[in-house]
Image (cartoon, rainbow, N blue to C red):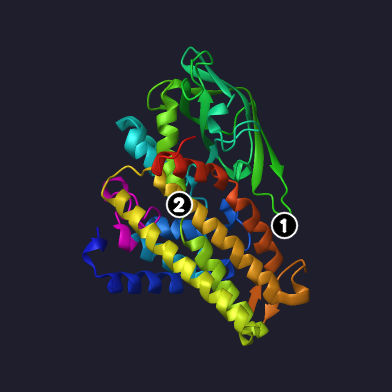
């Protein structure tokens, strides 16, 4: 096993860059949509063989064990070369949670299957009446012998139609005195009677979101992660992972790179006002990357992220939106055109990027909710 952290940052960046440029398929670069696993399976197999599927996981669990600076370099090089993030809900979200809260049996069973993508995961959190206020969830799981029986509905479940399993929050004690109590964290198979997945088509024509209905679906009791009725603790821990993941600078960095290439081809940089606005966006992206590195450092030291991690999600999503608005302006009268716009060797789907940016300030906890969290938990302002 290679001790990646013993390398200098420059050495590590060179190795990662050479691998991506030599091995990542050209036809998969900068995909405008989130692919199904079948589209990228051959790339995942290559990463798995190299041991690069889970750069942030500790080496003892099959990860690369990268420290904060190396992890940022890894993601920066992925974004620079247009490497698709793939089907990584298991790696980015449920895997770290199992590592932290799971039993040894759960670690031994689930973690290798996550790395190999034998199991492909989706997240069952949001419901029609429980989005940003997640504690309002009503999907129930009742104990029946050795199983939980699940009834209810989840919505905005990303790529559920391409998943084999779902990690989910369910209400296991409907009589708990507080809504944050009586919630448990379950792992459940998708391919079973009683699970109905229906895709949702977005404005850009993609079907990456789904509704999932549970009608007496079942999962073994051993698929409970953590303690029964203590899932809110799990949720907060996983949301911390999600906040830093959603708050990754790559979202804005990739958009900024596309904007620069497109705008130069369109001659937008001849306009001093546009140059000024582009410079401001670029500085915002750099500032955000520095903030992200601070939180990533906390995770690598084994520290629990606090409420202030909400800053990441607010900053990057609003910066992303501003960048896509600049793309529309740079496109001029073509800004409302459906499909990719070609400028030299660069092809950018301006309108699709604009559409993609709109919901980013809503999913994962709306930015209004995140600002409330910061005001109360960080600044100590009254509710």
Which residue appears at 56% of the width and 58% of the height?
318
Please check the rendered image and state whether residue 52 is part of the magenta-colored stretch, yes or no: yes
- Quarter holding the N terminus? bottom left
Using the image, determine if residue 314 lies above or below residue 168. below
Q: Quadrant of residue 214?
A: top right
The foreground one among 152 and 282 is 282
Position of 50 compared to 164: left or right?
Answer: left
The foreground one among 281 and 29 is 281
Quadrant of the rendered image containing residue 100: top left
Residue at the disc numbered 1: 204
Mark 1 residue crowding within 10 angstroms, few (<14) / some (14–19) / many (20+): some
Image disc number at residue 311: 2
For the question of whether residue 131 can be seen, the reply is yes
The residue most toward the front is 382
Nearer the N terminus, badge 2 or badge 1? 1
Prevailing SS of the magenta stretch: loop
User: In the image, residue 131 lies at what x, y percent?
Assistant: 59, 36
How dense is the environment of label 2, judged by Cα within 10 Å: few (below 14), some, or many (20 and up)?
Answer: many
Q: Is residue 20 above or below residue 104?
A: below
Q: Which mark is residue 226?
A: none
Tell me whether the residue at label 2 lies in contact with that at label 1, contact meaning CB atoms closer than 8 angstroms. no
Q: Residue 165: image x %, image y %?
A: 53, 37
Residue 265: x %, y % from top left: 64, 84
Between disc 2 and disc 1, the foreground one is 2
Q: Residue at x 65, y 82 (%)?
A: 268
Residue numbers of the magenta segment: 50-70
At 60% from the left and 29% from the top, the residue drawn is 192
138 drawn magenta: no
In the structure shown, which secondary structural element does the residue marked by tag 1 occupy? loop
């Amino acid at each position: 096993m290679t001790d990646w952290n013993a390398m200098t940052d420059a050495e590590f960046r060179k190795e990662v860059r050479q691998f991506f440029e030599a091995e990542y398929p050209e036809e998969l670069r900068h995909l405008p949509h989130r692919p199904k696993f079948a589209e990228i399976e051959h790339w995942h197999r290559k990463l798995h063989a190299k041991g690069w599927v889970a750069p942030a996981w500790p080496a003892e669990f099959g990860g690369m064990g990268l420290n904060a600076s190396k992890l940022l370099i890894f993601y920066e090089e992925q974004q620079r070369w247009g490497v698709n993030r793939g089907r990584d809900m298991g790696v980015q979200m449920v895997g770290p949670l199992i590592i932290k809260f799971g039993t040894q049996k759960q670690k031994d069973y689930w973690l290798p299957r996550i790395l190999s993508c034998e199991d492909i995961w989706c997240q069952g959190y949001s419901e029609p009446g429980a989005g940003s206020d997640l504690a309002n969830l009503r999907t129930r799981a009742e104990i029946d012998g050795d199983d939980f029986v699940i009834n209810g509905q989840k919505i905005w479940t990303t790529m559920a139609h391409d998943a084999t399993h779902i990690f989910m929050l369910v209400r296991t004690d409907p009589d708990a005195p507080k809504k944050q109590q009586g919630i448990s964290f379950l792992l459940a198979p998708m391919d079973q009677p009683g699970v109905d997945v229906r895709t949702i088509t977005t404005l850009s024509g993609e079907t990456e979101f789904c509704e999932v209905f549970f009608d007496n679906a079942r999962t073994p009791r051993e698929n409970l992660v953590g303690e029964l009725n203590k899932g809110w603790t799990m949720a907060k821990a996983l949301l911390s992972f999600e906040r830093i993941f959603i708050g990754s600078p790559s979202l804005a960095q990739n958009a900024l790179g596309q904007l620069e290439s497109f705008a130069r081809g369109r001659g937008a940089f001849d306009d001093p006002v546009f140059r000024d606005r582009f410079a401001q966006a670029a500085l915002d992206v750099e500032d955000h990357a520095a903030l992200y590195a601070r939180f990533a450092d906390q995770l690598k030291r084994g520290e629990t992220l606090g409420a202030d991690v909400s800053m990441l999600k607010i900053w990057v999503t609003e910066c992303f939106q501003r960048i896509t608005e600049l793309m529309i302006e740079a496109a001029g009268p073509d800004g409302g055109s459906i499909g990719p716009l070609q400028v030299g060797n660069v092809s950018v789907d301006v309108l699709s990027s604009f559409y993609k940016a709109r919901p980013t300030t809503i999913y994962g906890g709306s930015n209004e909710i995140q600002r409330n969290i910061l005001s109360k938990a960080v600044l100590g302002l009254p509710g």
